[in-house]
Image (spheres, rainbow, N blue to C red):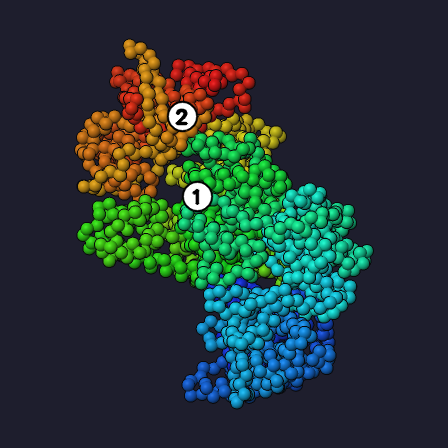
């Protein structure tokens, strides 16, 4: 961006325009090629540069001269200002000098120290400046040389070696003349202002023998030091360099005292590998030439890198070093270099503050308004109070809620102290109570100073309990006046939120004495009008009330004199808490780092850390934020478990990963701390035996309350931090050390939140809109992520030393994070991806070579290599092979060089997921060129754009992502252009996956977009709508704000997947197809738009109108993109009033988590296969008024919470529930409903039932009875679906889709010599537990076999509750299996390998066929309808095929029903129709796994402990034909013969109860059970007996 700006500047000067720009740091370096050009062309121009650190081993945004020194060879003149006043004066000198000399100027001053300092100066009026402009030189040196067709010339030619050199030297005379011109301009400005400057200005004793030479703001501090030292009898001086290029030796030598013998040159830069730093080398050269026979001693030092403070004590150390017998000739000052031992010893108590200057320190909290209030105070006291004033502000590295310290100085005399206050403070205020434990707050306070503390403690007893000993000692020993105020609570009461600045400013004006109290408070009230009028009258009134309220709430604490005898110790070093789930090597590394580096830095003691503590190269460990525990929130959330429906929405929206769901088993609960609450986990069988809890890390919470606002169940509320910490403080320490459990699908909203977030506790602002997206990415893919992060907000909260929020899982895996430059982040990430790919391809070649050439590879390692090669790019499928390789290869690595290479490169065995992350300033503006290049290449990288629609990291500047009418910096009159559409631009390549998401608008769509993007084998781009505090919204409700943005059409939700094109589908999926509210209503909810209404209502309304039309047109365009040809035809016909034709259907869905939406879309596709055109939309996205015109409506609805409608269907339900709708409104409509629910809930499938009933009430004709899916079923919704949908097809009489033999995803290969991976194949989610008792309860001659079983759970983690059932996984009878395999013509004992191309996890890789057909495949179970249809396709005998088709037809319904009475199984069908012979691979594909049979548990944990009882009656029968049949599971259990000393292992799982028990035992129960249905009754009775 800066590079492009400088190109524009080059062009502007070439056009003859007097041009200037402002830049710093990396932006300046990007301009260097242009600087050479402009200097070579002798173009008059001025760059004003806030000199800042160039990123090296780490990014630093602070001050030194490394950026400027990188430009010293370009030919630009370098002119340095040392103070805010000099910036004013020498800025003018630079402009005058460039006009007169034709030499371009770089006018620089210290970034942050000078550029961010607030000081009182004398401004030169523009009219006076205009009179100094030399019009003749301006015309001659600029205008006449402009590119103009009236007097054409040519510039920028290409020159050969014969003339380039001469042309370059021809410019030298301009540089020779430049210093004299600069001095002349300085003199001219001095005549105007009375302030005289010199190119090289000496200050100090005229007979000084020791002189320090330097540039920049530190020179102002040095003047005070020189005065102080000379007043004590020293003889020292200072030479300030202002013109560094061109360097004029004559002026320099003339400025030095003739008596000088020793010179120390201080550079605020460090040039590694050089003989010396830039200024030092010039001084050495100059002095050597000037005094060839009388050499001076010249030493050089480095100071102040990255705004390291330069104090009077440090300069005193430099002068002392000059006097040393053997001075250090190359030194550093301000740090402790205990590695190369170049540092000077410093006495920081050395003080040169002039009398009459008041010093004040304010310890603020980022976001509480302290900085802004203090800036305002400085201006008021300088402007209206008649004082000289100076303000400097330091920040920690958190985006908001970080520690800030304001250093303010006031006085009648000139202030030259350009460093932070380190002693002698008259007034200190701490704005957060936690600071008393973290910082040495009163270390700098003077005797009889004033200390004000914002805290909830108001009595001496509370103060005694909470203040550390050192602080008490400092207060008492220095006789400090001590005041407290509960400003946090008072601000909330006044409606100011966390903004306590006005309250604390009122305290300052009352106590500091800088002005009379009454006039000071009036000044403050008047200033409030200026500051807050744009935020509305209520804000103004609240702040003015705060001025008076502070006086009433301020309490002086009369402390005992005994405080002065307290030990001089702070809060003390803390003991870091153990993190069980962090591997020990990582934990040790992190703990050492935290103690050695992070804690001192967080305590603001980083300046004292020695060089030896740091790793060269800037590397730092991840996972350090888990030990930060800031404890800054005023209020934090508290969970109400009895209201919670366990949706996990609170977790997915949390910006800082402080609120999380946890699952625990019975053994975990025995270790739970007192007061810890959990409830039985709800969901499918996978949650059986587990309890659920939502737990909050109170010490890491920022109190944003997004979780409270986003909870659909009102199961969270806010309480004061101190209160919650006292009650629940140890709960987080308990849950965070539980085993990581996630039995759910992690690619769902709920399941994703059981995944450990590998981004936690970042320094992002409270309510940050960016972090939830990145956190979600780490939950889904964090164990394999490599992140290239652009500079910006996400690099500040994601990569600031030393608090690193990216963490690791229990294996030590986690995101690897890096940052290059702002502009080249896309290329940086692209390069990492290409580099990793090359390493992996080389490793792949080595593995292939090893298999081909290395003879003695162990068989297991060989099969692991083969499995890895087959799954080279599949992380999940390759994981087990990688684990085996990692275990086996170290033992054989030395056997062969190839194996050794493989061993050395095992870190790239697993595929990596490469992510390029940044904000819109990078993606839309500065880095767009590189981003576009990466998009065009099609490599497998994922690009995540966190779109805040502004440069949010730098205070909210306009970007190309900013939408029209937004008021921001550089667009104060409202942005007049529309937002750039990055997504549409990326789609033009055709092979880029593009998604636009807004988490708060649609959680599921966001999760699905991340899933699809990462799985896409090419470039993916995800655009994330990321609300920012600078938008002027209440961040607590930012998720609701996202929803409104989508509903209004301001932000679109879509997914563009090129893979769909290859499937014959439309690649664009518009997930927000309907605009539901006006854009203007949305715009009026945010201050960034409302400001324009207040400033210029007419312009605002014009912009809003244009924006509304543009958004509507874009929505229509994307909507058309999402349609297939027929849908588009219908849509276009409807726009012109024509009626569409053909058989059509409407599919409506009500979906909360996305499952119902997926089912609906799958069903809509099936309709299309049957030649029925369908439209599939969420209920609220459908135009309700068109419903009576629909001939067929199919509804797929899910129930959420306590019988509530999903968010995307509530408006539809409200409208269709209108009692005024006539009864026959839908008389011409047919409909069918399929409902998804969970039988464990009271309101099982309520949504579907309500919709079914309401459609019937309105006259619609029901096609088939409602389908009721149960989450507890083995196949979840598919169990009911497979029964419901065939009946629907029969009733519709639709033409069946083309018959195709399904392709199998399994491939079997013989594995002679191999052994099965395991003897017992344990189904996913099941565990092996010993069956110890099997007792017959009835007499042997009874006609039913009724048995009592007991399982021993003592050595398992299985737990159960009253009312639960036990799922038993049976085996098929081995003899029957082998009979079938013999019939099939295969050997059951044969060992085979199974290649699973679908990664279903259905089978082990190496197994016997007997195992597969005995333990896994349900070949003796009831076949699905799909299996019949498959047999009909495969049957080669026409008679057999016809028989099957007849049974499946509508006409054969009765015959099929009779046929099923024989309970045929898969084997029966295969043997009945032998011409439909299936291969083993096809059987693996089409025969399902054996499902567990559920039995009510007959025991009670309270009485029976680890014993689980079942009471089971054998299930057997005879069919109408007389065949004897038996249930698979009861036969399996009956045949097991456990003995006391030899129990039999059985695969089981616990399923949650489907009913809710009374809260206590006093409530009577009526128990009814038929036969073995008495089992749960027995359990309840035993529980009450106990």
Task: Determine which quarter of the picture holds residue 973.
Answer: bottom right
Task: Farthest residue to the bottom: give it.
Answer: 293
Residue with the mark numbered 2: 1506
Residue in the picture at 66% in, 80% down = 205
Residue 1111 location, x and y as percent?
Answer: 57, 52
Residue 49 location, x and y as percent?
Answer: 59, 71
Residue in the picture at 66% in, 67% down = 351
Residue 1454 location, x and y as percent?
Answer: 34, 22
- Cα distance in 3D space between marks 2 and 1: 27 Å
Residue 585 visible to an observer of this rendering: yes
In the rendered image, the vertical position of residue 153 relative to residue 277, given as above or below: below
Residue 309 location, x and y as percent?
Answer: 59, 65
**In the displayed structure image, the side of residue 971 where residue 1376 appears, left or right:** left
Asked whether 402 or 426 is in front, the reply is 426
Residue 1194 visible to an observer of this rendering: no
Residue with the mark numbered 1: 581
Asked whether 1069 or 536 is in front, the reply is 536
**In the displayed structure image, the side of residue 363 where residue 1063 appears, left or right:** left
Q: Residues within 10 Å of mark 2 (few under 14, many from 20)?
A: many
Q: What element carries label 1?
A: loop
């Amino acid at each position: 961006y800066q590079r492009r700006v400088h190109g524009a500047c080059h062009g502007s000067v070439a056009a003859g325009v007097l041009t200037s720009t402002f830049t710093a740091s990396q932006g300046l370096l990007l301009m260097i090629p242009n600087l050479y050009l402009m200097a070579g062309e002798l173009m008059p121009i001025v760059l004003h540069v806030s000199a800042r650190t160039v990123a090296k081993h780490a990014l630093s945004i602070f001050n030194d001269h490394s950026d400027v020194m990188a430009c010293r060879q370009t030919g630009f003149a370098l002119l340095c200002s040392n103070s805010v006043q000099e910036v004013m004066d020498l800025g003018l000198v630079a402009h005058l000098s460039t006009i007169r000399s034709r030499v371009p100027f770089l006018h620089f001053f210290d970034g942050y120290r000078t550029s961010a300092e607030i000081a009182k100066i004398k401004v030169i009026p523009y009219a006076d400046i205009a009179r100094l402009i030399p019009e003749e030189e301006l015309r001659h040196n600029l205008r006449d040389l402009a590119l103009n067709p009236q007097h054409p010339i040519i510039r920028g030619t290409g020159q050969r070696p014969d003339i380039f050199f001469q042309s370059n030297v021809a410019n030298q005379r301009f540089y020779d003349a430049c210093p004299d011109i600069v001095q002349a301009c300085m003199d001219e400005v001095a005549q105007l202002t009375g302030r005289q400057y010199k190119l090289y200005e000496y200050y100090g004793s005229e007979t000084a023998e020791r002189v320090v030479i330097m540039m920049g703001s530190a020179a102002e501090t040095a003047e005070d030091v020189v005065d102080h030292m000379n007043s004590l009898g020293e003889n020292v001086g200072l030479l300030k360099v202002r013109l560094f290029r061109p360097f004029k030796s004559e002026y320099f030598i003339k400025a030095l005292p003739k008596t000088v013998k020793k010179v120390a040159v201080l550079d605020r830069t460090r040039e590694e590998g050089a003989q010396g730093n830039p200024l030092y080398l010039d001084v050495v050269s100059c002095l050597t030439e000037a005094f060839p026979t009388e050499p001076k001693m010249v030493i050089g030092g480095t100071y102040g890198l990255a705004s390291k403070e330069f104090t009077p004590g440090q300069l005193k150390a430099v002068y002392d070093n000059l006097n040393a017998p053997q001075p250090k000739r190359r030194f550093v000052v301000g740090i402790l270099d205990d590695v190369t031992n170049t540092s000077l010893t410093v006495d920081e108590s050395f003080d040169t503050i002039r009398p009459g200057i008041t010093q004040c320190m304010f310890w603020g909290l980022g976001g509480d308004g302290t900085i802004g209030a203090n800036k305002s105070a400085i201006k008021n006291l300088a402007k209206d109070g008649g004082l000289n004033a100076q303000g400097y502000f330091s920040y920690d590295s958190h985006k908001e809620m970080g520690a800030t310290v304001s250093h303010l100085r006031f006085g009648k005399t000139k202030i030259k102290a350009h460093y932070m206050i380190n002693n002698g403070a008259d007034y200190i205020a701490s704005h957060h109570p936690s600071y008393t434990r973290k910082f040495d707050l009163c270390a700098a306070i003077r005797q009889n100073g004033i200390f004000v503390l914002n805290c909830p403690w108001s009595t001496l007893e509370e103060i005694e309990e909470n203040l550390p000993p050192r602080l008490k000692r400092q207060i008492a020993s220095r006789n400090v006046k001590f005041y407290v105020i509960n400003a946090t609570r008072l601000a909330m009461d006044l409606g100011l939120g966390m903004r306590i600045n006005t309250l604390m400013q009122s305290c300052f004006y009352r106590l500091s004495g800088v002005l009379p109290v009454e006039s000071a408070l009036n000044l403050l009230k008047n200033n409030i009008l200026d500051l807050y009028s744009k935020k509305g009258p209520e804000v103004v009134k609240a702040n003015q009330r705060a001025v008076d309220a502070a006086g009433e709430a301020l309490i002086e604490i009369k402390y005992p004199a005994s405080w002065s005898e307290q030990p001089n110790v702070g809060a003390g070093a803390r003991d870091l808490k153990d993190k069980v789930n962090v591997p020990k090597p990582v934990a040790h590394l992190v703990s050492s780092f935290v103690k050695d580096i992070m804690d001192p830095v967080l305590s603001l003691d980083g300046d004292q850390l020695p060089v030896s503590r740091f790793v060269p190269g800037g590397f730092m460990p991840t996972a350090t934020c888990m030990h930060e525990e800031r404890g800054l929130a005023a209020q934090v959330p508290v969970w109400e478990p009895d209201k919670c429906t366990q949706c996990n929405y609170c977790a997915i929206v949390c910006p800082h990963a402080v609120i999380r769901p946890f699952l625990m088993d019975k053994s975990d609960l025995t270790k739970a701390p007192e007061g810890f609450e959990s409830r039985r986990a709800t969901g499918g069988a996978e949650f059986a035996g587990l309890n659920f809890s939502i737990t909050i890390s109170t010490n890491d919470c920022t109190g944003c309350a997004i979780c409270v606002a986003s909870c659909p169940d009102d199961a969270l509320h806010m309480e004061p931090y101190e209160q919650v910490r006292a009650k629940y403080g140890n709960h987080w320490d308990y849950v965070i050390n539980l085993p990581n459990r996630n039995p759910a699908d992690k690619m769902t909203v709920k399941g994703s939140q059981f995944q450990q977030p590998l981004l936690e506790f970042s320094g992002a602002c409270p309510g940050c809109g960016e972090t939830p997206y990145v956190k979600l990415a780490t939950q889904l893919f964090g164990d394999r992520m490599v992140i290239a992060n652009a500079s910006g907000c996400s690099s500040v909260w994601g990569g600031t030393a030393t608090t690193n929020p990216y963490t690791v899982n229990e294996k030590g895996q986690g995101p690897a994070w890096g940052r290059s430059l702002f502009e080249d982040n896309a290329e940086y990430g692209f390069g990492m991806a290409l580099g990793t790919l090359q390493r992996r391809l080389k490793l792949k070649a080595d593995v292939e070579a090893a298999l081909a050439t290395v003879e003695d590879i162990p068989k297991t390692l060989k099969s692991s290599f083969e499995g890895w090669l087959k799954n080279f790019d599949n992380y999940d499928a390759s994981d087990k092979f990688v684990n085996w390789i990692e275990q086996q290869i170290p033992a054989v690595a030395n056997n062969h060089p190839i194996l050794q290479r493989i061993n050395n490169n095992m870190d790239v065995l697993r595929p990596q997921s490469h992510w390029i992350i940044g904000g819109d300033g990078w993606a839309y503006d500065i880095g767009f060129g590189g981003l576009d290049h990466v998009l065009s290449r099609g490599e497998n990288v994922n690009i995540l754009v966190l779109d805040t629609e502004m440069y949010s990291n730098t205070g909210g500047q306009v970007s190309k992502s900013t939408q029209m009418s937004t008021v921001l910096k550089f667009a104060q009159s409202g942005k007049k252009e529309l937002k750039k559409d990055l997504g549409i631009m990326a789609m033009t390549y055709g092979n880029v996956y593009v998604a636009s998401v807004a988490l708060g608008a649609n959680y599921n769509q966001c999760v699905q977009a991340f899933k699809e993007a990462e799985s896409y084998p090419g470039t993916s781009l995800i655009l994330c709508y990321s609300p920012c505090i600078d938008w002027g919204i209440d961040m607590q409700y930012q998720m609701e704000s996202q929803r409104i943005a989508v509903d209004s059409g301001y932000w679109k939700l879509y997914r563009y997947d090129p893979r769909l094109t290859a499937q014959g589908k439309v690649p664009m999926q518009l997930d927000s197809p309907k605009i539901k509210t006006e854009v203007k209503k949305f715009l009026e909810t945010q201050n960034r738009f409302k400001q324009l209404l207040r400033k210029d209502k007419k312009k605002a309304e014009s912009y809003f109108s244009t924006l509304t039309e543009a958004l509507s047109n874009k929505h229509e365009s994307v909507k058309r993109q999402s349609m297939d040809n027929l849908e588009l035809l219908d849509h276009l016909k409807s726009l012109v009033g024509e009626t569409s034709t053909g058989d059509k259907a409407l599919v409506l869905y009500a979906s909360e988590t996305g499952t119902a939406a997926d089912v609906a879309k799958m069903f809509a596709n099936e309709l299309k296969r049957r030649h029925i055109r369908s439209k599939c939309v969420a209920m609220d996205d459908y135009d309700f008024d068109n419903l009576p015109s629909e001939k067929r409506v199919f509804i797929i609805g899910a129930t959420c919470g306590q019988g509530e409608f999903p968010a995307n269907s509530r408006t539809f339900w409200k409208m269709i529930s209108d009692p005024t709708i006539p009864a026959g409104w839908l008389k011409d409509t047919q409909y069918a409903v399929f409902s998804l629910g969970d039988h464990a809930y009271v309101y099982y499938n309520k949504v579907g039932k309500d919709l079914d009933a309401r459609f019937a009430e309105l006259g619609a004709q029901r096609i088939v009875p409602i389908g009721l899916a149960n989450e507890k079923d083995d196949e979840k919704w598919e169990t009911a679906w497979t029964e419901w949908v065939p009946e629907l097809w029969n009733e519709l009489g639709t033409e069946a889709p083309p018959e195709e033999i399904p392709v199998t995803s399994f491939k079997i290969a013989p594995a002679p010599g191999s052994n099965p991976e395991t003897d017992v194949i344990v189904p996913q989610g099941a565990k092996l537990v010993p069956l110890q008792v099997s007792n017959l309860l009835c007499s042997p001659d009874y006609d039913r076999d009724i048995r009592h079983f007991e399982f021993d759970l003592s050595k398992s983690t299985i737990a159960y509750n009253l009312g639960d059932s036990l799922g038993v996984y049976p085996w098929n009878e081995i003899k029957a299996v082998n009979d079938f395999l013999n019939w099939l013509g295969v050997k059951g004992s044969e060992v085979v390998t199974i290649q699973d191309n679908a990664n279903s996890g259905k089978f082990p890789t190496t197994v016997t066929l007997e195992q597969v057909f005995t333990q896994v495949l349900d070949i003796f179970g009831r076949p699905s309808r799909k299996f019949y249809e498959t047999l009909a396709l495969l049957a080669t005998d026409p008679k057999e095929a016809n028989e099957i088709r007849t049974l499946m037809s509508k006409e054969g319904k009765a015959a099929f029903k009779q046929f099923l009475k024989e309970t045929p199984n898969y084997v029966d069908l295969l043997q009945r129709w032998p011409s439909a012979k299936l291969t083993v691979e096809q059987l693996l594909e089409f025969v399902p796994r054996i499902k567990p049979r559920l039995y009510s548990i007959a025991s009670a944990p309270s009485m029976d402990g680890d014993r689980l009882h079942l009471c089971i009656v054998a299930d057997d029968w005879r069919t109408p034909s007389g065949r004897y049949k038996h249930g698979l599971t009861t036969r399996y259990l009956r045949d097991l013969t456990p003995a006391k000393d030899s129990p039999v292992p059985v695969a089981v799982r616990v399923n949650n109860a489907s009913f809710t028990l009374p809260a206590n035992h006093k409530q009577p129960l009526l128990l009814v059970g038929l036969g073995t249905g008495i089992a749960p009754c027995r359990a309840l009775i035993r529980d009450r007996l106990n």
